[in-house]
Image (cartoon, grey):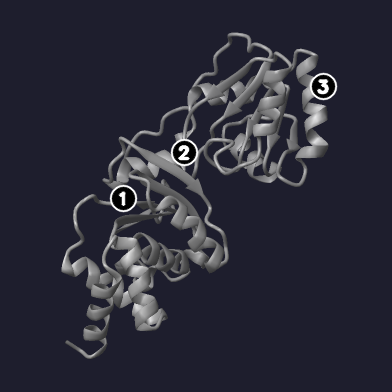
Amino acid sequence: MARRLPPPALDDAPLAPGLYVVATPIGNLRDITLRALDVLAAADLVLAEDTRVAGKLLSAYGLSAKLERYDEHGAERTRPRAMAALAEGKRVALISDAGTPLVSDPGYRIVREAAAEGTAVFPIPGASALLAGLSAAGLPTDRFLFAGFPPPKSAARRTFLEELAPLRATLVFFEGGSRLAASLADMAAVFGAREAVVCRELTKLYETLYRGPLATLAADPRLDAPKGEIVILVGPGRDVEATAGDIDTALADALLRLRPAEAAAEVAKALGLSRREVYQRAMEMRAGR
């Protein structure tokens, strides 16, 4: 049995006044950094997206701190008090429920205001679902775009995705389990036969990665409303001509939802092909050829 390590000793060096943007674990509590523990131990005030979640994290490491709620609903009420504390030379830490604050979480306004007032802002890096997903996906990382959560409704989601389709970069999205299958289907329709990876419950007990073409993932029953936190990564579009298999895969998905002419228009746009030729292939597929 592996020997259990003792809790790390905290740094005794005084913490400078300012705003500390502190990354916290996205699942496994041992992913917190030693520097983050130093900051949370010494902070005069900790702004937390959910004080109950923050309380559990602090308790796991034997820490206590003055906590105030700072989420999209309570930020306007809490921010003036936090800014007053910073003006008095206090040490204020900002954390989210999981991962790096400001990445699809509230917080940029207080960072902007603190910087405008001349207050020091210190990034305390650590866990990030975005970077964890990129590191394990096996998709190109020389250029990537984090696009956050897609819109919940299909029409708005497709418009949103169409704006991203021309980009030659790996695209990274967050999504809820209940909308995962629908989002993957819309991505397959808009992006065509791109490779993708769905990361579920990163760093947690049931961490799972699913890999394959978007249309295949959209049809995977395991991805129909799974529980847990989801990161979707979509590979960049290719500059080479789509293969016959790419066309058939994209059409097979589109024909489940649309009439042949509409399916052909959608696939032709996604793959950069002739609409007439794609329509002919759609009719062949409908006829079983």
Image coords of residue 273 (percent x, y): 26, 64
Going 65% across and 11% down the picture, which residue do you hit? 16
- Label 2 environment density (alpha carbons within 10 Å; few <14, some 14–19, many ≥20): some
Q: Position of residue 263 (x, y in %)?
A: 36, 76
Please, what secondary structure does the residue beneath circle 2 have? loop
Mark 1 to mark 3 CA distance (whole Å): 45 Å
Q: Nearer the viewer, residue 123 or 53?
A: 123
What is the three-letter code of the residue carrying label 2?
Ser
- Give the SS element for disc 3: helix
Q: Position of 259 compared to 86: left or right? A: left
Q: Which residue is mark 3?
A: 84
Q: Please state which amino acid type lies under the numbered disc 1.
A: Gly
In front: label 2 or label 1 = 1
Q: Which mark is residue 145?
A: none
- Residue 215 falls in which quadrant of the image? bottom left
Q: Which residue is mark 1?
A: 235
The mark that comes first in sequence, 2 or 1, is 2
The image shows residue 267, relative to residue 59, as above or below, that is: below
Q: Residue furthest top?
A: 13
Q: Secondary structure at mark 1?
A: loop
Mark positioned earlier in the residue sequence (1 or 3): 3
x and y, in percent, of residue 18 in the image: 67, 17
Q: Is residue 288 visible?
A: yes
**Crowding at mark 3 (Cα within 10 Å: few <14, some 14-19, many 20+):** few
Front in this rendered view, residue 57 or 100? 100
Q: Position of residue 187 (x, y in %)?
A: 40, 62
Badge 1 density bin: few <14, some 14–19, many ≥20, Cα 10 Å:
many
Residue 128 numbered tag: 2
Marks 2 and 1: CB-CB under 8 Å? no
Amino acid type at image mark 3: Ala
